Amino acid sequence: MKSIVLSSVVTALLMFSGCSKDPAVAEDTKAQEVSTPVAQEVQPVATETVSPENSVVDTTDTQTQGLSISEIESKLPTVYFDFDKYEIKPAMQEKIDAAAEMGTTVAKDLKVKLEGNCDEWGSDEYNFALGLKRADAVKKALVADGVEASRISMVSYGKSNPVCTEHTKECWAKNRRVDFKVLP
Amino acid sequence: MKILVSLLVFFHILFASDATIEVIKKAETLPTLAIEDASVSYNDTFKLQFFKSLVADMNVISLFNVDRHYRYTHYNAVNVLVENKDKEYVLRYKMSEDDDGILNVNVKLLQQEEVVFSKEYRISNKDIYMFISHAIAYDINAFMGEPSVAWMKRKVIFTRLIAPKKTEIVIADYTLTYQHVIIKGGFNIFPKWATKDQKSFYYTSLDGVKPTLKYVDVKKGTIKNIISSDGMVVCSDVSSNGKLLLLTMALDGQPDIYTYNVDTKKYKKETFYKGIDVNGQFFGHNKIVFISSRLGYPNVFSKSLDTNEVEQMVYYGRSNSACSVHGKYIVYEARESSNAFSKNTFNLHLISTETDFIRRLTAVGMNEFPRFSADGDAILFIKNYKAQSAIGIIRLNHNKNYLFPLKSGRIQSMDW
């Protein structure tokens, strides 16, 4: 019995030949942090990633009717939303109309990715869906203004792409948004 | 009169077995326990770390009033230390390092100075000492004849946000003291254990053209793609045999819940509401519980997988945005203040299918990521309160919560 327990403990623990970081210990319901010796870090699982920045081919010397992609992107709006909502506010509709105008003129050969985002409240799975509904609301508004649906893609980042992290209502309002990213 | 009395007795017995009725075990009735260190190797810092881990674990099993004083003795001393003479139990342990660098731990439990339990443990890497501490507490709990606390030995997997759109996926022990980064770099989120033995897991990668669900075999170190979806794809739950997944996908930009068969690779749409349906959890026989905004705010609903009948499960609260299920119990995250523009309180609530009661499990702060242990005995969660974060364990049948300070950065998602 003892050897079975020992071997099962050793087997289970062989998977964790890594380092310990920031240990936290408890006494009753309080705890005191004790510093730990530096431990060896094992190789991470191999992955290949292409970051969103690198996935876009640099087209700064690609001109579109006198404007570069980065210039077009800088003129596109950020659309903001109310708490727990994905409806387009009247004040935001004008911004979307202006974006659609560009999408049918100077940027008519380009594609756009709409990135939905949320403030820090609520579960992230719910917030990913909420961010997506926000992006979808902007997409529908662009399509209604004449931009082809096939040129618009959407993604949500939930609460994982904040522009600020203060716990203030101003910061929360800044994070409840849809960003435009231009693709060639 | 007799009928009334027997009815009262009947109802008491009926409700006494449901955790939505609070079970109070008074601290004064628990036997006292002191812990004596008799280690012959390692420096004082490591000895104190191990002692504190053991104190924490012996507290969490909720069987003793644990004395927190660090005291040293000899392992084979016949008597306990004079300061511990009045303790009903003494747990004495000896750590020693052998010539191969292996950490050995000898443990004995004394009851009124008589050895009633003893065991030896060995571990090759002392940096994972906390797993021995968890194993000791697990064994003492079993020796005392209590229901299993196997969850103490299980691993937690979580995503830590290290910068906007940059994450790490980490595997840890239940206190998050030990942490091992398993996926480094990129934007990878929503990890979910794929099997009971915790040797594989799913996660969502946002690094490609489309969000993609991936499967990792930890032992082999392999990653394979499962399914991609426009907008989002999240694995919310895995069936007990591992063959069926509950996914939240947005194949046409509309987030809904799908069942996905791992063998046939076919999926079936389960929800059809035009708003938000997420966080599906397998529940009972052929049913799911999920979060939906179909009432204008996130709330908890259930649905049969055979029909489209949807039933509201919670009739209280303004925003119930996450849930976890075990047996007849649902724990969910409830917003308890209504002002969207001030600090909010999110508490965890527990309901069951057999009573109308709602039991509040936490008191203050922002409490999120509720996760039942595999056996339903405990709930793991994260608490943020007054600029501090902690990982919490709720022992449902002991009505006690334990908190361990957390310095892991911002946690995006967690599974147990």
Image: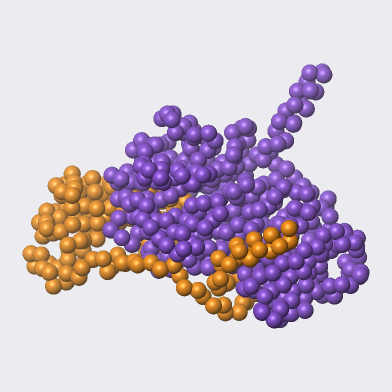
Q: Is residue A117 left or right of residue B5?
A: left
Q: Position of residue B110 (x, y in %)?
A: 86, 62
Question: Residue at 38% across / 48% down in the picture?
Answer: A129
Along the viewing direction, whichever of B11 and A8 lies nearer the viewer: A8
Q: Position of residue A54 (x, y in %)?
A: 27, 69
Quadrant in which the C terminus of chain B is drawn: bottom right
Please say if A35 is above or below A134.
below
Q: Is residue A93 left or right of residue B346?
A: left
Please say if B200 is above or below A17.
above
Q: Position of residue B231 (x, y in %)?
A: 32, 51
Along the viewing direction, whichever of B250 and B217 lies nearer the viewer: B217
Q: Quadrant of residue B402?
A: bottom right
Q: Position of residue A58 (x, y in %)?
A: 20, 70
Question: Residue at 24% across / 56% down in the picture?
Answer: A113
Whether residue B264 is visible here, answered yes or no, is yes
Q: Which chain is orange?
A: A
Question: Residue at 59% across / 39% down in the picture?
Answer: B327
Q: Quadrant of residue B251?
A: top left
Please say if B320 is above or below B384.
above
Quadrant in which the N terminus of chain B is drawn: top right
Q: Is residue B7 left or right of residue A61?
A: right
Question: Residue at 63% across / 32% down in the picture?
Answer: B355
Q: Colour of chain B?
A: purple
